[in-house]
Image: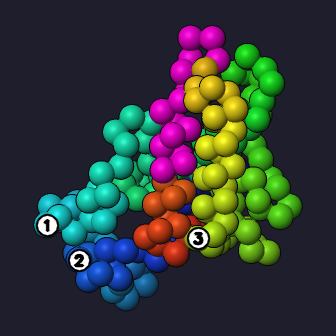
Amino acid sequence: MGLDNFPHEYPCKRQGTAVMERYTLNDGSVDERIDCDATAKVDGCPYLNADPPKEGAVIGMFGTHCWYRGKYGNFLINALSSQTDDIDAVDSYVWDDDGDNSFYGTDADGLHRPAEACKSLADQMASALDERGGRLVFGDDDRTDDAKYAIWYLRWVADECNGMGAWY
């Protein structure tokens, strides 16, 4: 099962800087979506304007800048709490019934993680990283930047997007 995360509220839409594109659905109706490339070209993308870390970024499966690959975030949560030095032994799947320790939402359907829950998860991950001496390394495989990016992303969606949604 895949998991991607996205802003609960798109800040580019909220601040009126999103460039929208119209497209036709199979039933002939017309809808709109954010044109991320056009929005970025006019400096209207709050995500890119926030200067996200260049290293460790794991964007969602559609290549949208402000989406995050939550399945990998769950792997990082497990890796940070793991006692093993074998990266292959770290489980990539997390399902936490209350949603506290995963990139799934905290609501009954696992679809929305409010801002405070994002901040809490970021703090938990940062604390776990600190407990590991500020590094997440398995042999020659250094995942420190990946963990730092996940922490940054959680704080960004908390501050700018009223939390995040989960799509799986």
Find disc 1 in the rendering and name its residue.
Answer: 42
Tell me which label, 2 or 3, sits earlier in the chain: 2
Q: Nearer the viewer, mark 2 or mark 3?
A: 3
Quick one: SS at disc 2? loop
Q: From mark 3 to mark 1, how far is it between C-alphas?
A: 27 Å
- Seen at 63% across and 69% down, the residue is 116
Q: Nearer the viewer, mark 3 or mark 1?
A: 3
Q: Is residue 41 above or below residue 163?
A: above
Whether residue 81 appears in this view of the structure is: yes
The mark found on residue 17 in the picture is 2
Is 93 left or right of 66, judged from the image as shown? right
Is 71 left or right of 95, judged from the image as shown? left
* Residue type marked 2: Thr
* Residue type marked 3: Ala
Q: Is residue 131 above or below residue 34?
A: above
In magenta segment, residue 30: no
Q: Position of residue 61 (x, y in %)?
A: 48, 50
